[in-house]
């Protein structure tokens, strides 16, 4: 069919759009309370920028545009990369730390699933210019408080937190350094695999027979790890992790060594947020990426951030019956009894629209059908403009909730 939306993409009709915008408005409210400033970037970037540091999986997911001349562009797959580019452009002139947030759409060419789309919206927050654990905690506190602002309780979701230095350092104790990134990619998908599938994927490492040791490591608690002899790199990651956890304001944060965040640019703290029942995909995730600004040829700058996807969040809010209801319809519907009063009715509409949302008849309906239509669009009040009332310079105002009517002087209708 020609009139069919593209696979893995969504239409938003007025009610859905209104619900989505209410969610976004609450997200913005929390971000601004933390003094994050809103930014926006183009939908497309150079393919060179997008593919600079992402790994083969992400490169294959980039929607690329037809090459024109020497330009090869692609649609952004996240907001961190364009935000880093924006930061670099004004890096020297901005006071640090820089705290930005965005809510926008992006694209990934992948198989659509429940909570995963090819075109999707994310809420994104970044802090540039602080290497302190307080910055990582600020990001995680913001993510948690955003979910609480939407009506969720701490008991409804959990934050799984880890540190890439810790994980990498522990793996490097028994794996060649060049195999660690591959192992992390598998670990990142562990919760989506059956046990045999995880063993099979780990078995593809050149260092054979390591699945058992890796699984035992991933089951370690924080208390157990503190007693283990580990490399300086792993110890540094453990210390960073403890400092971050100590600065988070909420109690639903749990250590998880299998939280890896597969993207190659993470360098320290990493975290993901899941619903407590485990019914949905990750609601949010992020972490520290201290090398990305320098990789994109800016001055080396510490950075941390997270993204929260609307597709999965919407599923969770719907399951909890927390999706905002669409806003009521217009404040007024001005009903026109006949042609003789049309001019006065239009004058009234124009006056009311300076302060209110107002609808009126555009199709020549009779009064009964106009009242039915006003009810269907959830108008709060109907103003009936008729010839008899106008002779007395009045109109009839009906409250659509109670059904009560009263005569009001035309000059006093506000």
Image (spheres, grey):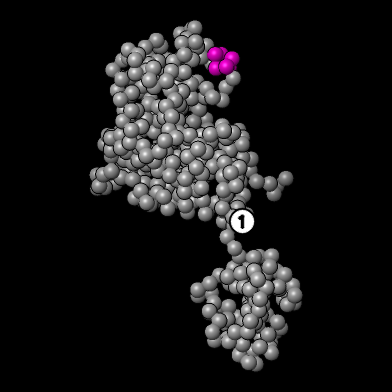
Q: Disc 1 marks which residue?
A: 15
What secondary structure is marked by label 1? Answer: helix
Assess disc 1: are there few (<14), some (14-19) or many (≥20) residues with their C-alpha within 10 Å of its C-alpha: few
In x, y percent, where is residue 367?
A: 73, 77
Specify the quadrant of the image occupied by residue 329. bottom right
Residue depicted at x 32% and y 38%? 135
In x, y percent, where is residue 308?
A: 48, 41
Q: Main secondary structure of the magenta part?
A: helix
243 relative to 70 in the view: left or right: left
Q: Is residue 134 above or below residue 213?
A: below
Residue depicted at x 66% and y 65%? 377
Q: Nearer the viewer, residue 272 or 65?
A: 272
In x, y percent, where is residue 280?
A: 57, 35
* Range drawn in magenta: 195-200
In x, y percent, where is residue 220?
A: 43, 18
281 falls in the magenta region:
no
- Quadrant in which the N terminus appears: top right
């Amino acid at each position: 069919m020609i009139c069919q939306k593209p696979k893995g993409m969504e239409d938003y009709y007025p009610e859905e759009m209104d619900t989505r915008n209410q969610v976004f408005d609450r997200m913005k409210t929390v971000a601004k309370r933390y003094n994050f400033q809103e930014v926006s970037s183009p939908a497309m970037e150079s393919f060179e920028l997008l593919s600079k540091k992402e790994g083969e999986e992400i490169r294959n997911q980039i929607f690329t545009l037809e090459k024109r001349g020497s330009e090869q562009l692609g649609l952004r797959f996240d907001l961190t990369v364009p935000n880093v580019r924006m930061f670099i452009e004004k890096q020297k002139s901005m006071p640090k730390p820089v705290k930005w947030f965005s809510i926008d759409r992006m694209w990934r060419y992948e198989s659509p699933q429940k909570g995963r789309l090819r075109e999707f919206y994310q809420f994104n927050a970044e802090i540039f210019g602080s290497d302190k654990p307080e910055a990582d905690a600020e990001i995680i506190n913001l993510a948690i408080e955003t979910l609480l602002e939407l009506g969720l309780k701490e008991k409804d979701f959990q934050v799984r937190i880890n540190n890439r230095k810790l994980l990498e350092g522990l793996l490097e104790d028994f794996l060649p350094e060049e195999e660690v990134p591959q192992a992390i990619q598998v670990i990142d998908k562990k919760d989506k695999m059956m046990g045999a599938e995880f063993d099979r994927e780990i078995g593809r490492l050149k260092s054979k027979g390591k699945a058992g040791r890796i699984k035992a490591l991933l089951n370690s608690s924080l208390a157990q790890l503190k007693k283990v002899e580990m490399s300086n790199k792993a110890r540094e990651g453990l210390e960073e992790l403890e400092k971050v956890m100590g600065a988070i304001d909420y109690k639903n944060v749990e250590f998880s060594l299998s939280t890896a965040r597969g993207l190659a640019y993470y360098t320290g703290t990493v975290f993901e947020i899941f619903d407590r029942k485990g019914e949905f995909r990750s609601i949010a995730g992020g972490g520290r990426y201290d090398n990305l600004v320098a990789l994109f040829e800016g001055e080396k700058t510490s950075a941390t951030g997270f993204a929260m996807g609307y597709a999965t969040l919407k599923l969770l809010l719907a399951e909890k019956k927390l999706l905002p209801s669409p806003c009521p319809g217009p404040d007024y519907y001005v009903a026109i009894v006949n042609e003789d009063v049309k001019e006065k009715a239009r004058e009234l509409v124009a006056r009311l629209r300076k302060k209110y949302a107002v609808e009126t008849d555009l199709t020549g309906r009779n009064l009964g059908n106009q009242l039915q239509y006003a009810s269907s669009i959830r108008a709060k009040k109907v103003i009936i403009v008729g010839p008899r009332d106008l002779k007395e310079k009045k109109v009839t105002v009906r409250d659509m909730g109670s059904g009560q009517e009263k005569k009001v002087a035309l000059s006093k209708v506000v």
